[in-house]
Image (spheres, grey):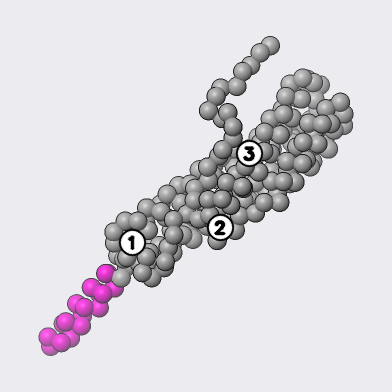
Amino acid sequence: MTTKLIKFLVVPAVALSLSACGINSVPTAEENAKAKWADVESTYQRRADLIPNLVETVKGFAAQESEVLTKVTEARAKATSIQVNPGDLNNAGAMQNYTMAQDGLSQALSGMRVVVEKYPDLKSNQNYLALQSQLEGTENRINVARRDYNESVRQYNTTIRTFPDIIGAKIIHGAEPMEPFASTTEGADEAPEVSF
């Protein structure tokens, strides 16, 4: 009878100790971070898909500012040419290149917004207003997706560095910390000047 009781107590104890050492929590946190990264890429893709339509609409109304629109098109091409795979999430260089390309596109879009301010008749066009609204919504989605990704990376990195999950993270999974998304737009810490 004591052998059965020992087996009855040992099996749950072993299961509990394995579950407490990162066997499941490490891959769960890693997959969550990868899914959040896919959301970041998806929102950037949405923006990249909208830009050609926006550029074509604006071209009809602002031919005199074609240089700005060309810069937007070129920045979009550069931003969509750089890809980060889930395997690159712990590669600081790859993440920095991706961020710089996306920031370049954001800067080009800012230049296009100046065109809109200089030529108020663009604002009266319903197609432009609809696309501008979608682009603004996409920028908000990008911000939310980046924030969610950074939170999931924080959770993953915390999981693989804290006891008892560090046991499974190092011994079983060989887990490495992931890189959070860091925006490196120059001058982002300074308020923009507005003059009329």
> Disc 2 residue type?
Asp
- The tag on residue 88 is 2
Q: Using the image, determine if residue 17 lies above or below residue 63.
A: below
**Residue at (69%, 46%) from the top-left corner?**
79
Q: Which of the two labelled residues, at mark 1 and mark 2, occupies the earlier sequence position?
A: 2
Marks counted in the figure total 3
Q: Does the magenta stretch include residue 6?
A: yes
> 82 or 37, which lies in front?
82
Q: Which of the two labelled residues, at mark 2 and mark 3, occupies the earlier sequence position?
A: 2
Calculate the distance from the C-alpha at mark 2 to the C-alpha at mark 3.
19 Å
Look at the image and give the residue range highlighted in magenta: 1-17
Which residue is the site of mark 1?
166
Q: Do the residues labelled 1 and 2 touch (CB within 8 Å)?
A: no
Q: Position of residue 195 (x, y in %)?
A: 66, 13
- Judge from the rendering whether residue 180 lies leftward or rightward of residue 72; answer left or right: left
On the image, which quarter does residue 114 sit in? top right
> Disc 1 residue type?
Ile
Secondary structure under tag 3 reads helix
**Residue at (47%, 54%) from the top-left corner?**
178
- The tag on residue 132 is none
Q: Using the image, determine if residue 119 lies above or below residue 57.
A: above
Q: Position of residue 139 (x, y in %)?
A: 62, 38
